[in-house]
Image (tube, grey):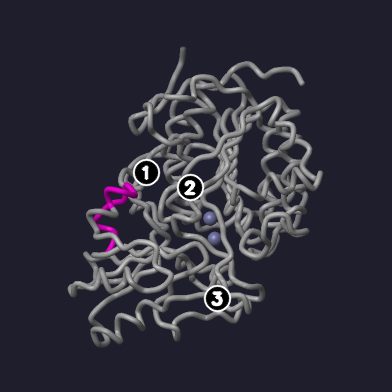
């Protein structure tokens, strides 16, 4: 049987179009809450006719590292993308990591396209498009920068980058592309604008999952295999009064060591700060002094690891992280200096991600799987970046409802 091998994995050729969906920031509780509210009948149905699992995402639980892991089938130590932003020691500057030059391996999307598959990728934000579309012979566009032809195809105006409609555009485009081109492989990646604002079960969250449910049902009716996961979860990161619960780590270190002795890098940093004010639960620190224990003792810090420990535990490229990696607890975030964070765009109490507390994500399929247990070794937990492997290598025929 025809197959494609890349990054140490082998994938069976699809027996029908496969649509893999990455729902940005989809904490596991969102879908069950929408199902309970009765607004997501397709997702509810998967309990009976498909496969409902959960998995662990990549740490740091941020968008780019996880999307790249999903489309390469590999952890960041292999593909190299361990944040949105990092400190490039070679140039001594802090830079965005969204340029394909930082990517160290090919994607399985490109590998399938090279093997003759018709491949389509639609992302919400443009920041992911160049990475996901790297060397891809196929269709690849973002909703944010959709051109006139795409707008005509989708039949929706280009939405604001800060809107639920940006993700709806991705789903609508996916359905239209499937109707028009019938790609063999399609990857849809949304934005977590809604998840940053609305907790599971709230009206805005349920409305988002109700919208998504309708498009997934359409793709299912078009005869697609559907697999769905998230890049990371999402948690409330604020105090009882609604103010963000922040450890301003650069200020703390400057107080201990003097200004300029330590450099705190927040890999969540990206041009879209309105979501989260660049506050997440993961930071990396470049510092010579031995402050590990002192940082670990700060209230709200979950774990502090050395570069080597973090690289091993989280499968990260060691030369792209600092001397220390700091992860905060479920409801706490880490900042640099208070003065460097513009929180004026935060209209609701902060919800964010980045830490171990946002590692659990859903892993759903509209088909029955077999051989999942032990597929990756007896004790290995399922990862969100196993999704293509499971969707292609473990499918059984769909059971009639
Ligand atoms: Zn994300
Ligand atoms: Zn986010």
What stretch of residues is rendered in magenta? 311-322
Task: Assign a secondary structure to mark 3.
Answer: loop
Label 1 crowd (10 A; few <14 / some 14-19 / many >=20): many
**Residue 153 location, quadrant:** top right
Task: Name which of mark 1 and mark 2 comes first in the sequence.
Answer: 2
Q: Quadrant of the C terminus?
A: top right
Q: Is residue 326 left or right of residue 179?
A: left
Q: Which label is found at residue 244? A: 3
Residue depicted at x 61% and y 22%: 368
Task: Name which of mark 1 and mark 3 comes first in the sequence.
Answer: 1
Label 3 crowd (10 A; few <14 / some 14-19 / many >=20): many
Q: Is residue 123 left or right of residue 159?
A: left
Residue depicted at x 34% and y 53%: 101
Relative to 312, is 53 above or below?
above
Q: Nearer the viewer, mark 1 or mark 2?
A: 1
Q: Which label is found at residue 67? A: 2
Q: Quadrant of ligand 2?
A: bottom right
Q: Decide if ligand 1 comes within 8 Å of the CB at mark 2.
A: yes
The image position of residue 114, as x and y in percent, is 44, 29
Residue depicted at x 59% and y 70%: 350
Marks 1 and 3, how far apart in space? Answer: 31 Å
Instruction: Read off the residue under disc 1.
Output: 75
């Amino acid at each position: 049987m025809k197959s494609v091998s890349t990054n140490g994995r082998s994938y069976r050729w699809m027996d029908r179009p496969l649509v893999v969906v990455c729902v940005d920031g989809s904490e596991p509780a969102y879908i069950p809450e929408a199902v309970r509210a009765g607004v997501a009948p397709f997702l509810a149905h998967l309990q009976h006719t498909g496969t409902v699992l959960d998995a662990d995402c990549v740490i740091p639980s941020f968008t780019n590292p996880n999307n790249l892991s999903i489309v390469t089938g590999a952890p960041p130590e292999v593909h190299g993308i361990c944040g949105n932003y990092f400190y490039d020691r070679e140039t001594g500057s802090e830079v965005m990591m969204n340029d394909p030059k930082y990517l160290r391996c090919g994607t399985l999307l490109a590998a399938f396209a090279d093997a003759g598959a018709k491949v389509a990728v639609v992302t919400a934000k443009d920041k992911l498009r160049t990475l996901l579309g790297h060397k891809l012979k196929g269709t690849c566009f973002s909703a944010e920068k959709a051109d006139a032809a795409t707008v005509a195809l989708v039949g929706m105006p280009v939405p604001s980058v800060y809107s639920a409609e940006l993700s709806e555009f991705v789903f609508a485009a996916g359905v239209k592309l499937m109707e028009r081109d019938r790609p063999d492989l399609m990857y849809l990646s949304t934005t977590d604008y809604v998840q940053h604002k609305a907790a599971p079960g709230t009206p805005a969250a349920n409305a988002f999952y109700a919208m998504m449910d309708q498009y997934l049902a359409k793709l299912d009716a078009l005869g697609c295999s559907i697999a769905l996961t998230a890049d990371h979860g999402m948690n409330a990161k604020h105090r009882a009064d609604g103010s963000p619960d922040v450890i301003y780590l650069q200020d703390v270190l400057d107080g201990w060591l003097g200004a300029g002795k330590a450099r705190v890098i927040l890999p969540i940093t990206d041009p879209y700060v309105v979501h989260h004010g660049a506050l997440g639960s993961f930071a990396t620190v470049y510092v010579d002094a031995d402050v590990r224990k002192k940082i670990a003792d700060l209230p709200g810090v979950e774990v502090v690891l050395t570069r080597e420990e973090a690289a091993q535990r989280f499968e990260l490229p060691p030369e792209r992280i600092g001397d220390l990696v700091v992860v905060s607890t479920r409801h706490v975030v880490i900042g640099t200096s208070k003065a460097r964070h513009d929180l004026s765009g935060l209209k609701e109490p902060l919800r964010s991600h980045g830490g171990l507390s946002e590692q659990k994500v859903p892993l759903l399929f509209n088909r029955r799987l077999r051989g999942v247990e032990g597929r990756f070794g007896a004790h290995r937990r399922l990862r969100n970046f196993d999704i293509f492997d499971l969707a292609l290598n473990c499918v059984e025929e769909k059971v009639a409802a």
